Image (spheres, rainbow, N blue to C red):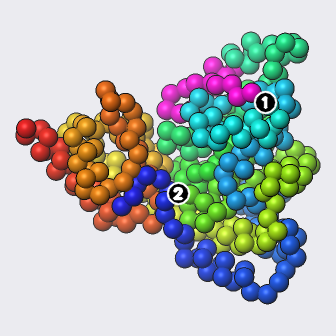
């Protein structure tokens, strides 16, 4: 099994069937079709608020284009140093915003520390012409450490953002995994906690290539359509993105997929906890596991044919495992069994 990412998986059968259905007949292009309108209606129902939503094909496009609506080119975007927009998007947020600056606010386990954010903003030189001006905060849920923000934690950051007149963006490429990990509604985890715009992910959770930029503050969406077009992300056959999102939301497929992925991660984490020499770097609160293993165990697992990313350093070797909507329970248990066997062999030497 390839545990490198939830991007390595295929697609849910329901989504593939929806794509086939969308290929029949002809409809108006560039998003002026019934399916795209239906997706917006579904998202409004799910979030208990009338939203303005735009399908795009990638998470990078969703994040960068959304953030570009929240900051001027002389603005500052506050994010965790390990945020996806900082480490994995090749300067796209800076490019699409016309040069805005990413400013790091650290915190344990991938989460922005609210008190530190407040301190940094209080000393940011707001109104001083020599400094970039704080414009927005971007938080990731699930975080890049596989941990989740609770509604209260989001609300604390939302309150600080409003205190200084900033907008709040949420990178939700694994939003479904964060949501099902706790007892709350989509609304409580987003706009009710102060989120202005959400990058709503589907690709990692069973879609082929589909995300949605969801504006809760609809005034912020006034020029998004132009930014999307200029950025090359307006699909002429938009129905093929929208059909994926429509099927993703139908019958709570998105939640079912995420629950399964989270359960498989919990199963692996619980199994690894009983393997001598294994330590978890972060709490497992979604579908990602960061674990420190002896180098010999890592090498043995790779030799067995398991795929995953090496993490950490040569001194403290660790790995990242990501489970998905179609991770088989037998495969998850098999990984733990192989890790235990390699650990026992290593200890016997």
Residue 244 as seen in the image, left or right of residue 107: right
Up the image or down, 347 lies above or below 114; here it is below
Judging depth in this view, the residue of 46 and 235 nearest the camera is: 235
Task: State the image coordinates of residue 326 (x, y, percent, origin top left).
Answer: 45, 66
Q: Which residues are magenta?
A: 100-118
Q: Which numbered disc flags the more N-terminal residue, 1 or 2?
A: 2
At a point 36% along the width and 61% down the height, the residue shown is 1
Could you tell me residue 325's position as x and y percent? 48, 63
Whether 236 is drawn above or below 192: the answer is: below
Residue 244: x %, y % from top left:
67, 70
Look at 81% across and 60% down and name the residue there.
234
Outermost residue, bottom side = 25
| Mark 2 element type | loop
Q: Which residue is mark 1?
A: 100
Q: How many marks?
A: 2
Crowding around mark 1 (Cα neighbors within 10 Å: few <14, some 14 to 19, many 20+) is: many
Residue 103 appears at what percent x and percent y? 69, 25
10 Å crowding of disc 2: few (<14), some (14-19), many (20+) = some
What is the number of the mark on residue 7? Answer: 2
Q: Secondary structure at mark 1?
A: loop
Q: CA distance from mark 1 to mark 2?
A: 29 Å
Comparing 309 with 189, the one in front is 309
Does residue 121 appear left or right of residue 256 in this picture? right
* Residue 198 falls within the magenta-colored stretch: no
């Amino acid at each position: 099994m390839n545990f490198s990412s939830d991007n390595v998986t295929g697609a849910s059968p329901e989504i593939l069937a929806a794509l086939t259905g969308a290929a029949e007949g002809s409809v108006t292009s560039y998003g002026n079709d019934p399916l795209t309108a239906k997706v917006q209606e579904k998202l409004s129902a799910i979030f208990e608020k009338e939203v303005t939503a735009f399908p795009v094909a990638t998470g990078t496009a969703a994040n960068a284009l959304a953030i570009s609506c929240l900051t001027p080119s002389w603005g500052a975007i506050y994010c965790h140093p390990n945020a996806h927009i900082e480490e994995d998007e090749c300067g796209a947020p800076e490019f699409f915003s016309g040069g805005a600056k990413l400013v790091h606010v650290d915190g344990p386990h991938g989460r922005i520390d609210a008190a530190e954010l407040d301190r940094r903003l209080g000393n940011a030189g707001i109104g001083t012409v020599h400094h970039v001006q704080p414009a927005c905060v971007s938080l990731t849920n699930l975080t890049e450490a596989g941990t989740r923000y609770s509604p209260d934690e989001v609300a604390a950051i939302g309150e600080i953002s409003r205190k200084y007149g900033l907008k709040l963006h949420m990178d939700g490429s694994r939003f479904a995994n964060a949501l099902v990990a706790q007892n709350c509604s989509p609304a409580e985890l987003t706009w009710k906690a102060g989120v202005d715009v959400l990058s709503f992910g589907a690709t990692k959770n069973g879609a082929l290539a589909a995300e949605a930029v969801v504006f809760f503050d609809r005034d912020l969406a006034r020029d998004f359509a132009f930014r999307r077009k200029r950025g090359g992300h307006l699909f002429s056959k938009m129905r093929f993105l929208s059909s994926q999102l429509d099927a993703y939301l139908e019958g709570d497929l998105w939640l079912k997929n995420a629950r399964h992925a989270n359960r498989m991660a919990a199963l692996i984490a619980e199994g690894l906890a009983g393997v001598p020499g294994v330590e978890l770097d972060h709490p497992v609160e979604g579908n990602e596991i960061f674990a420190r293993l002896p180098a010999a165990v890592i090498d043995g697992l790779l030799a067995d044919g398991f795929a995953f990313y090496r993490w950490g350093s040569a001194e403290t070797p660790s790995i990242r495992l990501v489970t998905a909507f179609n991770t088989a329970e037998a495969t998850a248990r098999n990984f733990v069994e192989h890790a235990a066997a390699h650990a026992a062999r290593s200890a016997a030497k």
